[in-house]
Amino acid sequence: MPDLPLIARARAHAASVAFRTPQGATTYQELLDRSAALATVLLAGAADLQEARVALLAPAGAAYVAAQWGLWRAGAVKVPICLTATEPEWEYALTDSGASAVMADAASARKIAPLCARLGLRLIDIDAPTGPAGQLPELTPARRAMILYTSGTTSKPKGVVTTHAHIAAQIESLIKAWEWQATDRIPLFLPMHHIHGIINVTSCALWAGATIEPFAKFDQPAILERVKADAYTLFMAVPTIYVKLIQALEAAPAAERAAIVGGFRRMRLMVSGSAALPASVHEQWTALTGQKLLERYGMTEIGMAISNPLRGERRPGAVGQALPGVEVRLKAENGDIITAEDTPGEIQVRGPNVFSEYWGKPAATAESFEAGGWYRTGDMAVLETGYYRIMGRLSVDIIKSGGYKLSALEIEAALLEHPDIAECAVLGLPDDTWGEAVSAAVVTKNGADLALPALREWCKSRLSVYKVPQRLVVVKELPRNAMGKVTKPAVRGLFG
């Protein structure tokens, strides 16, 4: 029986260590065995789950990957959901995807159990003992593999559908461009409901036969101890983390700083992504560590599309050139394809890496593509001496904060449930730490007082922490155009 691409690659590295933690190591063969057993549990006597959607809620680590591979090997489609999301956010993803089951680690299973019971969903504890592996279905790379929810210009996230073939293409492009090797070692502290953690770190490392050290979150002291010990050859993070690391290095005693810097300096590659990396941060990091960060550009719908080179100039403020197997073009507002440099246009991408559809949203899918299979990213860029530089987004309703792409409309909808808020407008404002800070301009009911700390506290039970506003301005009225629509460029000016 032919294997899915990732499973076939794992078999080639069966005796190697896939995951290492202070508690011990997990080999690729152990991942294969555990995933086969979990697939058998999921199948429950069926021959093939036939693309049934199964949600996965667990922290990064061997158990997560065993569950991911298990549901794939059973013929299911993975729906990753956020560990820190609120119950309404979980419920939206589960109901929109039509999930039939949830796989979760023991701690997460206890949290989501009441929702599963209310929705009538099967709940599988991935930490529980299993029986022997049974017969698994024969699958092809054309099968749907994952529905990953991403915020768009509508008030609710859209489910991005990728096949096993799409995922393999995304991985192979990065394996070639960044020269992944079986000898590589990388920490994993990025969220596992985000393409950065799922594809760029976990899937690339496991395809190459490398070793991953997982962390439940960005545990700076523990990670820096491992950096000092030369535990890693690669490091991938969002700009926010590099800002925090710079602050930590600058505050550290000289001897401690030298030991940590030595660990970073000896790594073969350090990557920044998921949000724009300020050129100042790029330059500070190089000055501190001697490492030139490699910045790249991608999104949930396409994986990675553009990257600074592994070998060659890594230009601050630019995202580089098209990755292997990926076609990139710029299109002007008037419909012309841009061939000249220094002329801005929308980034459009084509290739085997590009997703197939938004789940259950054929109209949104059709609107996102142009003739010939070109995906419209909604991001503006300019080509400068052969390197793309991102200029911003066509839609002001997308906020990139701390590596997440957020929908301003989703946050506005939540804020309007506040008893003292009559109107609101949310946008992202430039921020050195977060890339963009979620910022809310509100009109209160009857002139009620509203302070940021109180609003943030109210939001925490309704929005994931990274969606909660970081800035607030209370105004008498919001600026609107002749049609009565709030004009967000004018709202930006309200923050001074």
Image (cartoon, grey):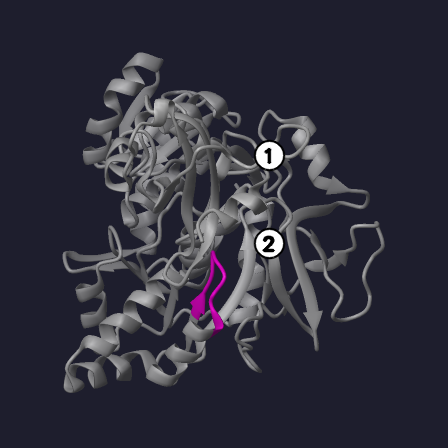
Q: Amino acid at mark 1?
A: Arg
In the image, what residue occupies the spot 28% across and 27% down?
Answer: 124
In the image, what residue occupies the spot 55% across and 81% down?
Answer: 311
Which of labels 2 and 1 is toward the front?
1
Q: 423 or 291: nearer the eye?
A: 423
Q: Amino acid at mark 2?
A: Ala
Count all numbered tags in the image, as a single digit: 2
User: Callout 1: helix, strand or loop?
Assistant: loop
User: Callout 2: helix, strand or loop?
Assistant: helix
Q: Is residue 278 highlighted in magenta? A: yes
Count residues near mark 1 (Cα–Cα under 10 Å), then give few for <14, some for 14-19, many for 20+: few
- x and y percentages locating residue 42 in the rendered image: 36, 27
Q: 480 or 280: nearer the eye?
A: 480
Residue 307: image quadrant is: bottom right
Q: Which residues are magenta?
A: 271-279
- x and y percentages locating residue 305 in the rendered image: 61, 59
Count residues near mark 2 (Cα–Cα under 10 Å), then give few for <14, some for 14-19, many for 20+: many
- x and y percentages locating residue 392 in the rendered image: 60, 56
Q: 123 or 419: nearer the eye?
A: 419
Q: Is residue 7 visible?
A: no
Q: Is residue 30 highlighted in magenta? A: no
Residue that badge 2 annotates = 169
Q: 173 or 331: nearer the eye?
A: 331
Distance (Cα) linking label 2 and label 1: 45 Å
Q: Is residue 458 visible?
A: yes
In the image, what residue occupies the spot 72% across and 33% down?
Answer: 366
- The vertical placement of 70 against 226, above or below, is above
User: Magenta stretch: dominant SS?
Assistant: loop
In the image, what residue occupies the spot 26% across and 77% down?
Answer: 230
Residue that badge 1 annotates = 480
Earlier residue among tags 2 and 1: 2
